[in-house]
Image (cartoon, grey):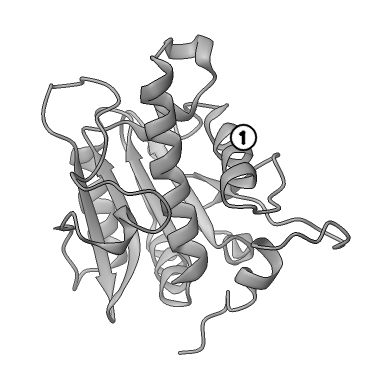
Amino acid sequence: MIRIFIFVFLSILSFSFDRPAQMKLALLKYGGGGDWYANPSSLTNLTRFCNKELQTNLDQSYATVEVGSAELFNYPFIHMTGHGNVVFTDLEAQNLRNYLMSGGFLHIDDNYGMDPFVRPSMKKVFPELDFIELPFQHPVYQSQFKFPNGLPKIHKHDNKNPQGFGLIWKGRLVCFYSYECDLSDGWEDREVHKDPEEIRIQALRMGANLVKYAFTN
């Protein structure tokens, strides 16, 4: 299948500032009562970091897009987070599946408490796929910054080791799920969580890896 986002590398990884519209990262709005809107400053800060470190030309005002909307296909990188319940209708699950099969990329970041809901919801999207833990040698850990030990640990939560899971469709990573890590907390404004600067930088670097991987694979 020809990827619908084949134009992304030229339109995003560009030094040109005379284009009529800038691409945005997008936040996924979902049903079920979970706080999909958590970490409101995270994508703005990640965008600034990517524009500086990857020389992207992303609009700092990220988009918010619903799971079942056709607008999903306007964004090559969708971020999903929260603390609780996640519900996809049949039509939403099919729309998300079509988006991912067509070249889109979904990053799910468990902000704590999502795991029991994310897994069955994504099983509805891809019944034939299971989340697999990605090896530390996977390109997602190497695309811009090197993470030889996988995901950085940003917040304690249950004090487990952070894990990066993926859904792979026809050889391509279409969904990356960061668990026991809380990357997007590390992207937030400094005063929100008061994380040490080295922790914030590690979170932003891993986020930049995800953005670059999504735009170039």
Residue 209: give x, y in percent of width and height.
42, 51
Residue 151 is situated, as x and y percent measured from the top left of the image, at 25, 41
Question: Compared to 14, does 5 lie above or below?
Answer: below
Q: Amino acid at mark 1?
A: Thr
**Vertical position of residue 172 compared to residue 193: above or below:** below
Residue 4 image position (x, y, % from top left): 57, 79
Any part of residue 67 in sight: no
User: Where is residue 159 shown, x and y percent of the image?
Assistant: 12, 22
Which of the image's four quarters has the C terminus? Answer: bottom left
As drawn, which residue projects farthest toward the left? Answer: 160
Residue at x 61%, y 34% (from the top left corner): 44
Circle 1 crowding by C-alpha within 10 Å: few under 14, some 14–19, many from 20: many
The part of the image, by quadrant, that contains residue 203 is top left
In the rendered image, the residue lying farthest to the bottom is 1
Q: Which residue is mark 1?
A: 44
Q: Is residue 123 left or right of residue 133?
A: right
Q: Mark 1 falls on what kind of element?
A: helix
Answer yes or no: is residue 154 visible.
Answer: yes
Query: Residue placed at 40% from the left, 37% from the top?
Result: 81
Q: Nearer the viewer, residue 44 or 64?
A: 44
Question: Is 121 drawn above or below residue 47 in the view shown?
Answer: below
